[in-house]
Amino acid sequence: MTESEFLDLADATLAAIEGVLEKACDEGDLDVECSRSGNVLEIECVNNGAKIIINSQAPMQEMWVAARSGGFHYKYDGQRWRNTRDGSELYAALSDIVSGQSGVQVTLQP
């Protein structure tokens, strides 16, 4: 994948994550605020101030997630973003991370 292709994919992924979080807030009890600056998406849980940071790393062609539970790297396998250590999928991991930090059970899907 070229750097330009990666940047387009990463931008679309960050926009999609922001969109599914906004939808989850509209449809349920989740209360998070998203703010985006370039290749960085910050998600803040309103009830406790906990933050999740997602950003793209063009040199590595990865998406990085920083949360209370740790730091995680995801590489695109042609269909999905997969954790470089355990193979877990990005949206499934974000579902667990957001649920854990917000105290509200959510399932996020692309």
Image: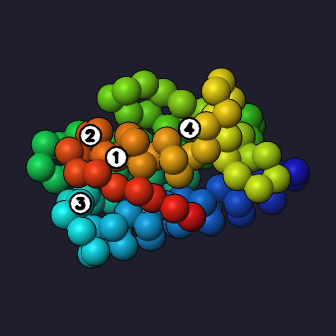
What x and y, as percent, mark residue 102?
23, 46
How many other residues sit within 10 Å of disc 3, few (<14), some (14-19) or many (≥20)?
A: many
Q: Residue at x 64, y 27 (%)?
A: 86
What x and y, as percent, mark residue 80?
70, 52
**Which label sits on residue 30?**
3
Label 4 is placed on what type of residue?
Trp
**Which label sits on residue 80?**
none
The local secondary structure at tag 3 comes to loop
Report the residue marked by disc 1: 98
Colour scheme shown: rainbow
Res. 6 image quadrant: bottom right
- N-terminal of the pair, mark 2 or mark 4, is 4
Label 3 is placed on what type of residue?
Leu
Describe residue 75's horizontal placement relative to residue 15 as left or right. right
Report the residue marked by disc 2: 101
Describe residue 13's horizontal placement relative to residue 45 as left or right. right
Q: Distance from label 3 to label 2 (Cα)?
A: 11 Å
Q: Does the residue at mark 4 contact the one at mark 3 (Cβ under 8 Å)?
A: no
Report the residue marked by disc 4: 64
What x and y, as percent, mark residue 60?
73, 35
Q: Does the residue at mark 1 contact the one at mark 3 (Cβ under 8 Å)?
A: yes
Q: Residue at x 48, y 27 (%)?
A: 71
The local secondary structure at tag 2 comes to helix
Q: Does the residue at mark 2 contact the one at mark 1 (Cβ under 8 Å)?
A: yes
- N-terminal of the pair, mark 4 or mark 1, is 4
Choose mark 4 or mark 3, whichever is in front.
Answer: 3
The local secondary structure at tag 4 comes to strand
Q: Distance from label 4 to label 1 (Cα)?
A: 15 Å
Label 2 is placed on what type of residue?
Gln
Question: Split into 4 quadrants, where in the image is the C terminus?
Answer: bottom right
Q: Distance from label 4 to label 3 (Cα)?
A: 23 Å
